[in-house]
Amino acid sequence: MMRIAICCGGGFSSSALAAHLEKDLTNHGLKSEAEFEFIPFVHLKDRQDEVDIAMLCPHLAWAANKDGNSFHIPLYIIPPKLYGLMPVEDFIQDAQDILAMWETKKENPMHFEDEERPLAITRMVSHRRYLAGEKPDMNKILGK
């Protein structure tokens, strides 16, 4: 099972996102695939052994760029367009793909080859699904 930290500074939005993703794991029968946990970024360095990957709120890009190489887990900046909108399955796929890349390139913050600038990312599905040409299921995004 993949352990994913959702991190931000204060914790309001990321704790809500982590709780939402955990609930969606149960609703979609994915509890054996992953678990999401909120960890404030200021505590991540001390708690990084508890997770496999940290997915950071967009506003933490500066911190990941500054301190990223002091972590032994991948740090991934969640693109603003995806924050809170991407279905749980897509979060899992992005985490799986970032972890696979981490095996050969341990450099933080991690990003997909064609996504160096998180603010410029326009996809609304996992990177894997985006490359396959898939479109977002708006019913899933809107919780219908």
Image (cartoon, rainbow, N blue to C red):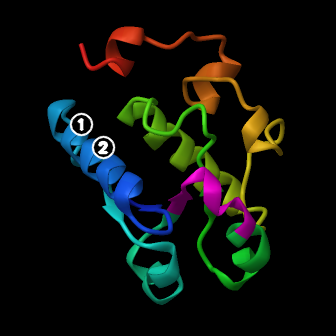
Of 116 and 3, which appears nearest the observer? 116
Q: Is residue 47 above or below residue 15?
A: below
Residue 98 point in image, percent of width and height: 63, 51
On screen, residue 76 versus residue 86, left or right, reads right
User: What's the residue at 32%, 58% (across, down)?
Assistant: 15
**Looking at numbered disc 2 in the image, what kind of residue is underneath it?**
Leu
Label annotation for residue 24: 1
Q: Residues within 10 Å of mark 1 (few under 14, many from 20)?
A: some
Residue 4 point in image, percent of width and height: 42, 59
User: What's the residue at 63%, 56% (across, down)?
Assistant: 59
Residue 143 point in image, percent of width and height: 27, 20
Does residue 108 appear anywhere in the picture? no
Q: Quadrant of the N terminus?
A: bottom left
Of 116 and 133, which appears nearest the observer? 116
Report the magenta residues as a range: 54-62
On screen, residue 102 versus residue 35, left or right, reads right
User: What's the residue at 51%, 74% (across, down)?
Assistant: 41
- Please report contact status of discs 1 and 2: CB closer than 8 Å, yes or no: yes
Label annotation for residue 21: 2
Does residue 67 appear anywhere in the picture? yes
Whether 58 is among the magenta residues is: yes
Whether 10 is among the magenta residues is: no
Q: Quadrant of the C terminus?
A: top left
Find numbered disc 2 in the image and state the secondary structure of the residue it sits on. Answer: helix
